[in-house]
Image (cartoon, rainbow, N blue to C red):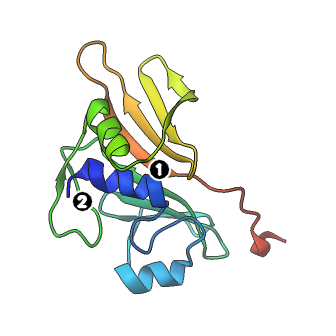
Amino acid sequence: MTLTELLASVARTARLGPVHVDASWDDVTAALGEPRQMLRSRRRPRLFGYGDLEVLVCRCRQVRLVTVRTWTETVELPTYTRAFPGEPTEADVVAALDRSGCPWEVDAAHTFDGQRGLRVPATSALFVFAVPATGEPRLHSMGLPDNGHRCPAAT
């Protein structure tokens, strides 16, 4: 499986193994082990990482945001024993989405000078590409956004 095939599957299902928006943080750590904390803070939400997978966790211990960083030379993800080559082209990502039968559209809110966004309407998955002055657009990140969660622990 290539990185673009994996990300197309994530965009179609809104899941990367046990990780998805609204997942219980206890279930994620039971499946993947303890992550590294990306930002040292005692406040919630907190940002955690498993290789190039970043997970934002609310104070109620639910996953709120999921991001896969792809701007590096290699991309490491939990449960995959090998690293994937990073920075896939927009053409490769679009081809993988099309092959998987995953409809997508240009996201105008994330498209401006030097950047282009593609969104999967069914899951709200967002692909953000860096658009260089010359050369092909390269995938910077792919994410699953918060779905409007209102934390019960905040009241």
Judging depth in this view, the residue of 34 and 21 nearest the camera is 21
Location of mark 2 (residue) = 76
Q: Residue 50 has which mark? A: none
Residue 69, horizontal then vertical, whole percent? 35, 49
The earlier-in-sequence mark between 1 and 2 is 2
Q: Residue at x 29, y 69 (%)?
A: 78
Location of mark 1 (residue) = 143
Q: Is residue 39 visible?
A: no
Q: Residues within 10 Å of mark 1 (few under 14, many from 20)?
A: many
Q: In the figure, 8 relative to 137: above or below?
A: below
Query: Mark 1 or 2, which is nearer the eye?
Result: 1
Q: Residues within 10 Å of mark 2 (few under 14, many from 20)?
A: many
Judging depth in this view, the residue of 15 and 31 nearest the camera is 15
Q: Secondary structure at mark 2?
A: loop
Q: Residue at x 45, y 55 (%)?
A: 12
Report how far apart the C-alphas of labels 1 and 2 lie in the structure: 15 Å
Q: Residue furthest bottom?
A: 30
Q: Amino acid at mark 2?
A: Glu
Q: Amino acid at mark 1?
A: Gly
